[in-house]
Amino acid sequence: MATRRQALTGLGALAVTGVGMSQLTPAMAAPKGTKSTSAQAVRSAAAGGPLVGAVDVHAHYLTPTYRQALINAGITQPDGMPSIPQWSADSALATMDTTGIAVAMLSVSSPGFDFGEAGKVSDLVRQVNEEGAAIVKAHPTRFGLMASLPLPDINAAVAEVNYAFDVLKADGIALETNYGGTYLGDPSFSPVLAELHKRNAVVHLHPTSPACWEATSLGAPRPMIEFLFDTTRTITQLILGGVLLKYPGIRFIVPHTGAALPVLADRISAFDLTQPSPVDVIGALKRLHYDVAGFALPRALPALLNLVGPETLLYGSDFPFTEDPIVKLLAAQLAGTTVLTPQQKQAMLNGNAAGLFPRLKNMARL
């Protein structure tokens, strides 16, 4: 049947998060008759959909400039995925409207810009950031911008932080978990983190392939397991190295329902107690923010809530790397879950984000 073929095509996006089709159980859909709660902090700009007024903090954009740069660099299967996904503002808005997403904070996903010569990379980052800002200007009530930085070029990255906030009026910054195998807690990144701290920046972390992926990815696309481990690795380094304590003004968003952190938190904390100056690992994790992009239910979200409070949760779709049918399926699952109360659920969808992004408070139509 044509409809079955279309559905199976859509399910191909499951590879993005490493979940097979056999794991798509009926429990992953919202129960029939589930009613959406009314939006409090943000009213939906979308007509219908399983969600109401969601703010998507984990949404990606790929301009023609960026797509061509990837192709020119020989990156046609980023992080082992089959292809570079298609994206346009119109396709993003269509998915948002039929899912119930009011606003999407756009960022560039992995592999980011860590390829090519340093000077050319800085120019490319500037151009793609400017293109992202133009998209926001064209749709000021629907999109925000999480600007990219030309790391590991530290001086250029600090300059881009200033340009992004002062000229482009970006809503935050998007950082990869590592750059050329160097993680964000490395002292070499201190000037960038100091500038982000000074500006009380919202920073959305996004995993990328680790330097050792050839030996560890089991021949699978790196988003399956390597992305989650890389997020866990960089957050662990930021905590154990005292970086979060040194730069408390940075408001980090951890992707994919905390990755492996909910399972490993106690183990990390216990090992750190053997060090001369242990830190409060659990306390540090409780002060971070977490998006629920990917397969948060039925297991990851309850595990995360055993570690942090619901006030830390933010919605994320991971569109277009997670395709439209799966975005809707996962949104329906979140809408129907009883893991959160209706009030906590709506706060996850938009109320918690309103405390991070001033843009949301200035949107008269929302």
Image (cartoon, rainbow, N blue to C red):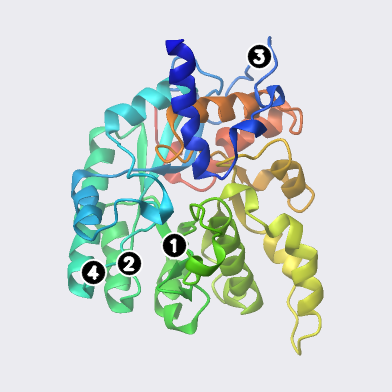
Question: Mark 1 or 4 closer to N-term?
Answer: 4
Report crowding for label 2: few under 14, some 14 to 19, many 20 or more residues within 10 A (C-alpha).
many
- 51 horizontally vs 239: left or right: left
Q: Amino acid at mark 4?
A: Gly
Q: CA distance from mark 1 to mark 4?
A: 16 Å
Q: Residue at x 58, y 72 (%)?
A: 238
The residue at which mark 2 appears reads as: 114
Q: Say which of marks 1 and 3 sits in front.
A: 1
Question: Mark 2 or 1 closer to N-term?
Answer: 2
Q: Say which of marks 3 and 2 sits in front.
A: 2
Q: Say which of marks 1 and 4 sits in front.
A: 4
Q: Position of residue 296 (x, y in %)?
A: 65, 40
Question: Mark 3 or 2 closer to N-term?
Answer: 3
The residue at which mark 4 appears reads as: 116
Disc 1 is placed on an element classified as strand
The residue at which mark 1 appears reads as: 176
- 164 horizontally vs 358: left or right: left
Q: Position of residue 344 (x, y in %)?
A: 70, 34
Q: Say which of marks 2 and 1 sits in front.
A: 2
Disc 3 is placed on an element classified as loop
Q: Amino acid at mark 3?
A: Lys
